[in-house]
Amino acid sequence: MTINAKIVKELRDKTGAGMMDCKKALLETDGNLEKAVDHLRKTGIAKAEKKGERTAKEGIIFSYIHQGGRLGVLIELNCETDFVAKTDGFSELAHNFAMQIAATNPLSIKREDIDESLLKREKAIFLDQAKASGKPENILEKIVDGRVEKFYAEACLLEQQFIKDSDRKVIDLLTEAVSTLGENIIINRFIRYAIGES
């Protein structure tokens, strides 16, 4: 089967993956564009997991100031090489993460970073709410677990829905960037400032 260069370019524009990866994905999926996108995402996740073990000591400190200067974010985004740190794709990724932080004010990068005492307090509140609603004892734990997952989805940057595309999570954006840029990428830390907030 021969793959038209136009469809390869279309897939590349859609996913940001390399030309050869796009061509391979289209060959694997008999030229079906949507299936090729899914194929690239699956293989991208596998590649990203392998790259996740590599050291990321380069990167940038990116600043984002929202219109009017009343809200700002500083984020440290790390990668493996200075070369990747200087690419437009890497800066765009940092910009997207900074905008996400500005809009959603997450408590942490990932769930493991959430303070244990805060989590205990939230669970206690969720349990009290479930009991007050008159739900049977045998499902209280499931209700609390569900609410804890929702809490993580709001409080942890990587688990949030991406503000520019609610079909993707921030972790998907990071995974795709690792696959596209070919290096391990880590959000090391961030801080959000807003006028009147402490």
Image (cartoon, rainbow, N blue to C red):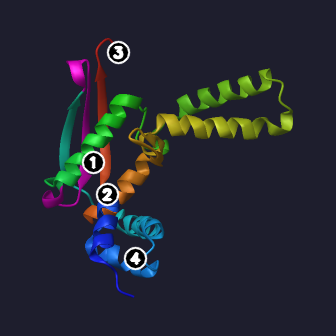
> Would residue 83 be counted in the magenta stretch?
yes
Residue 154 placed where, x, y %? 50, 35
> Is label 2 in contact with label 1 (beta carbons under 8 Å)?
yes
Q: Nearer the viewer, residue 1 or 46?
A: 1
Q: CA distance from mark 2 to mark 4?
A: 20 Å
* 3 is higher (above) or lower (below) than 195: below
Residue in the picture at 46% in, 65% down: 34
Depth check, mark 3 against mark 2: the one in front is 2
Q: CA distance from mark 3 to mark 4?
A: 50 Å
The type of residue carrying mark 4 is Leu
The type of residue carrying mark 2 is Ala
* 137 is higher (above) or lower (below) than 33: above
Residue occupied by mark 1: 93
Quarter of the rendering containing residue 19: bottom left
Residue occupied by mark 2: 177
Q: CA distance from mark 4 to mark 1?
A: 26 Å
Residue occupied by mark 3: 197
Q: Earlier in the sequence, mark 2 or mark 4?
A: 4
Label 1: element kind: helix
Q: Residues within 10 Å of mark 1 (few under 14, many from 20)?
A: some
Q: Residues within 10 Å of mark 2 (few under 14, many from 20)?
A: many
